[in-house]
Image (tube, rainbow, N blue to C red):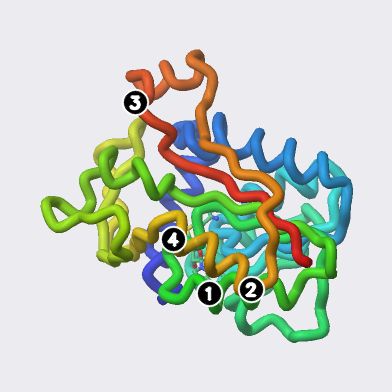
Amino acid sequence: MPHRWCDSAELRRKQIESGTDLTFNKVFKPIFIEKVLGLNREPILEVGAGTGHLSKELAANGLRITAVEPSTGMFKVAKEVLDGSGVELINCLVDDLPEHIKYEVAISHLVAHVVNDSTRFFNSIANHLEVGGHFVFSIPHPCFFNGYKKIFGDHYCYMESAQKEISFTITKDPNNVISGVPYHHRPLTSYISSLVSAGFAIDGFEETWPSYVVQKMYGEIWENPRYCVFICKKL
Ligand SMILES: C[S@@+](CC[C@H](N)C(=O)[O-])C[C@H]1O[C@@H](n2cnc3c(N)ncnc32)[C@H](O)[C@@H]1O
């Protein structure tokens, strides 16, 4: 349901560009840049680019990027953000990219937990990667995110997949609520099974744990890793 992201596009742009979104600016931007530069392969596909800021940053490092974003609201903002960046931006789901187009690297930041069918999502990405190509993606940490955000209340069982429409704010902008967006909880077993069945091997897994200097910017030290990053290789 990509249209659910349309209304939050301008707000997300403001939060990222003003620096109030610590998670994007201080945590994930450096992680993705380090990982992608370390792979030293192009071209790169960003899946679910949102406002386009991650692709813009990667392009500024000299990389060849295609970004896909299905939400028309996000796409419109990304088009402005990416103007002059050299990033090719396409308004579609990854599922709808023409079959023959292949990339060396795919990335997606905080997208896999919003899709209804993770197996289909990972299969679509695998179909657009060369053999030996990498897929790097982040999600809220399935073991800890519910404890942090209290999404499912008493009915929560870590081993059971569950889905909910949620509203959320970011730490440094508590008055602007983003609502009506999907959140899927899946145990790590489910993510790993879907990745393996899509033809990926897991090359790395990181539990996101920023430096204490960055954690303190949130106003409190994190109790647990709030997010995690999978580094996968297409077999
Ligand atoms: C939580 S937002 C993250 C956006 C951006 N990556 C960021 O971190 O700011 C999830 C995004 O994934 C996109 N999305 C959902 N399903 C998708 C799919 N099958 N293919 C590509 N993008 C998808 C949505 O439109 C939305 O912009």
Q: Amino acid at mark 1?
A: Thr
Pick the residue in front: 61 or 82.
Answer: 61
Asked if marks 4 and 1 touch (Cβ < 8 Å), the reply is no
Which residue is the site of mark 1? Answer: 119
Q: Could you tell me if residue 160 is visible in this image? A: yes
Of callouts 2 and 3, the N-terminal one: 2
Number of other residues with Cα within 10 Å of mark 1, as a class: few under 14, some 14 to 19, many 20 or more? many
Tag on residue 223?
Answer: 3
- Tell me the CA gap for discs 2 and 4: 16 Å
For the point 76% across and 45% down, the residue is 36
Which residue is the site of mark 2? Answer: 198
- Tell me the CA gap for discs 1 and 3: 31 Å
Of callouts 1 and 3, the N-terminal one: 1
Q: Amino acid at mark 3?
A: Glu
Q: Amino acid at mark 4?
A: His
Pick the residue in front: 197 or 149.
Answer: 197
Examine the image and state in which quarter residue 133 appears: bottom right
Number of other residues with Cα within 10 Å of mark 3, as a class: few under 14, some 14 to 19, many 20 or more? few
Q: Is residue 158 above or below residue 74?
A: above
Determine the secondary structure under disc 2: loop
Determine the secondary structure under disc 1: helix
Quadrant in the picture for the N terminus:
bottom left
Which residue is the site of mark 4? Answer: 113
For the point 39% across and 49% down, the residue is 142
Q: Position of residue 32 (x, y in %)?
A: 67, 42
For the point 71% across and 49% down, the residue is 203
Quadrant in the picture for the C terminus:
bottom right
Tag on residue 63?
Answer: none
